[in-house]
Image (cartoon, rainbow, N blue to C red):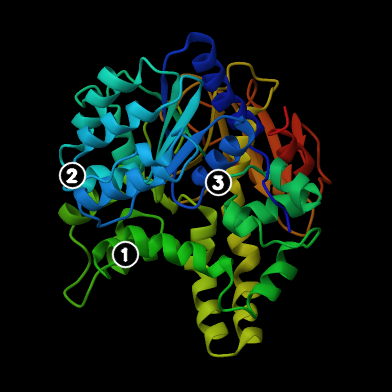
Amino acid sequence: MPGFIGRDAELAILRKRLDRVARTGTGAALALRGRRQVGKSRLVQEFCDRAGVPYVFSTATKGASPIEAVDAFLRDVRESALPADPELVPTLQNGSWPDAFRVLASVLPDAPSILVLDELPWLAEQDALFDGALQTGWDRLLSSRPVLLLLLGSDVHMMERLTAHDRPFYGRADTMVLGPLNPADLSEALGLGAADAIDAHLVTGGLPGIVRTWPHGTPALEFLEDECADPAAALFGVPEASLLAEFPNPDVSRRVIEAVGFGDRTHANIAASAGSRAGAVPSGTLSPLLRRLTEEKRVIAVDEPLSTRPGKPALYRIADSNLRLYLAALRAAHEQARRGRPEAGFRIVRRRWTSWRGRAVEPLVREALERADLPWPEVETVGGWWNRRFDPEVDLVGADRAPVAGRIGFAGSVKWLGSPFDGHDLADLRRAAGQVPGLDPAAAGLVVVSLSGVQARDGVDLVWTPEDVVAAWRS
C-alpha cells in the first residue's frame, strides 16, 4: 500500500512561497482549490511536516456557527507550535474573526511560520463577514509578518470567487489548482506497467484516497474483484461520499448526473432519462442546470465537435472517471456486495468494463497528446469530431484552437481493445477523417493510439502505445 505519492511539483511551489517569506520577512498567501478527495489537505500536511517551521492547521466544520468556528480556530492555534506559550492564546467569549486574527497576530513568531485554513468555503458560508475580516486581518496584521497563509477549499466555484476582482481578498493571494494524481504517478507508486497504470487511473480517477488502498502490482480487474467483496471499500465509499456531499437530495440534479453517468451523452437523451412521469426535463430547466454542473460544480464535462466549422451536438460526460465508473457499474456492484453477493457484483463490473474503458480512456489520451511534443507544432488542442448522426465519430482531432479551429493538424483513432488496430480500422479512420470539416487529407496527419498494437501502418504518421500515453506525464 503506497504512502504519500508524487506531488513533487506542487511541493516545490509551496516551498518556493515559504522561501520567499523567509527571504523578505513578509507574508505570502496562496489559495489552493481542487475537488473533494483530490488530496489538498494531505498535500499541505505533508508540506507542513517537511517545512521545518511552526504551523497551525485549522479545518472548518460545516454548519458550525461563527462563534463556534472562531473558538475552534483559536483552540487549534493554542494547541499548535505557533505560540511560545499556549496560555498567551485567550479564550474569547462571543469572539469574532477580527478578534481571532488579532490574537493570531499577537502570538506569531518572528521567524517564518505557516497558517492553514482548510475548508474555507464553509467559513464564508456560515459568516457573511468572513471574507472582509480575512482581508482586513491580512492587510493590517498578518501580511507584514513572515507567515505563509494557505487557503484550502473543495467548493471550486466558491474558491474562485474568493479571489475574484469584486471580492475583498482580490489580488492578495496566488492561486493553485490541484488535480488528481496522473498515470505516471500511479505507475511508479503501484509498480504497474503503462497499460495497467492507465487502467488504475481510470478506476481511481487519480484520487489518493483510493490509490492508497491499491495493492502493489495488482491489475485493475483483480483489484476490482477483491474490492467487490468489501462493502466498506474506499472504491465505493469515496465516490458515494463525494456525490452525497455535493448533491444530498434526490432531485433533478442527481437524476441528470446519474443519466450522464449511465451513458446518456446528448441533451435530448439526458432530458428523457432524467425526466419523470410527466415527461422529459424541459429544456428551460435542463440547459441552465447543465451549465451549473459543468461551469460551477465541474462534475460534468462537455465536449464539442472540433473542426473548422461550428458543430453539434455537444456531448456530456462525468468529468471524474472514478465517479463515472461508480455510476455506470460500481454502484450496482456495491449493492450486491452489501447483500453478500460479491461474485454477482463483480460480474456486473466485468460485463461493462470493456465498453466503459474504451470510452473513458479517450479524454485521457487527448490530454496526453496535448502535453506531448508532436510532429504538428501548430496543434495546441486535441478533441474529437462527430456529426448529428454520429456516423462517423472521429476519436482524435488535433487543431490550433477550439471549438472552432483555424487549422487541423491531424485526425486519429483510439482503439483500446484486446485486438490490434488493423486494416479495417485504418480504412474506417480514413473514411471518417475525410468528412471532418476543414481537414485536408493531403496535408493532415493520421494518428493511431492502440492498447494492443498496430497491424496496419500504411500512411499512419504517429502510432502511440500505452507507454507513450504514460510518458506524456513524465516529459
Q: Regarding mark 1 in the picture, which secondary structure is present there?
A: helix
The image quadrant that residue 382 belongs to is top right
x%, y% of residue 1?
73, 59
How dense is the environment of label 1, judged by Cα within 10 Å: few (below 14), some, or many (20 and up)? some
Residue wearing tag 3: 42
**Is 91 left or right of 23, judged from the image as shown?**
left
Distance from disc 2 to disc 3, alpha carbons, whole Å, reads: 26 Å
Distance from disc 1 to disc 2, alpha carbons, whole Å, reads: 28 Å
Q: Tell me the amino acid under the disc marked 3.
A: Arg
First in sequence, mark 1 or 2: give its number: 2
Task: Name the one closer to the observer, 284 or 104.
Answer: 104
Task: Name the one closer to the observer, 163 or 105.
Answer: 105
Residue appearing at x 68%, y 32% in the figure: 446
Q: Tell me the amino acid under the disc marked 1.
A: Arg
Residue 405 visible in the current orientation: no
First in sequence, mark 2 or 3: give its number: 3
x%, y% of residue 81?
50, 38
Residue wearing tag 2: 127
First in sequence, mark 3 or 1: give its number: 3
Distance from disc 3 to disc 1, alpha carbons, whole Å, reads: 29 Å
Image position of 199 with respect to 188: above or below = below
Residue wearing tag 1: 254
Residue 11 visible in the current orientation: yes
x%, y% of residue 215?
75, 62
Residue appearing at x 18%, y 48% in the figure: 93
Q: Tell me the amino acid under the disc marked 2.
A: Asp
**Is 57 left or right of 168, judged from the image as shown?**
right
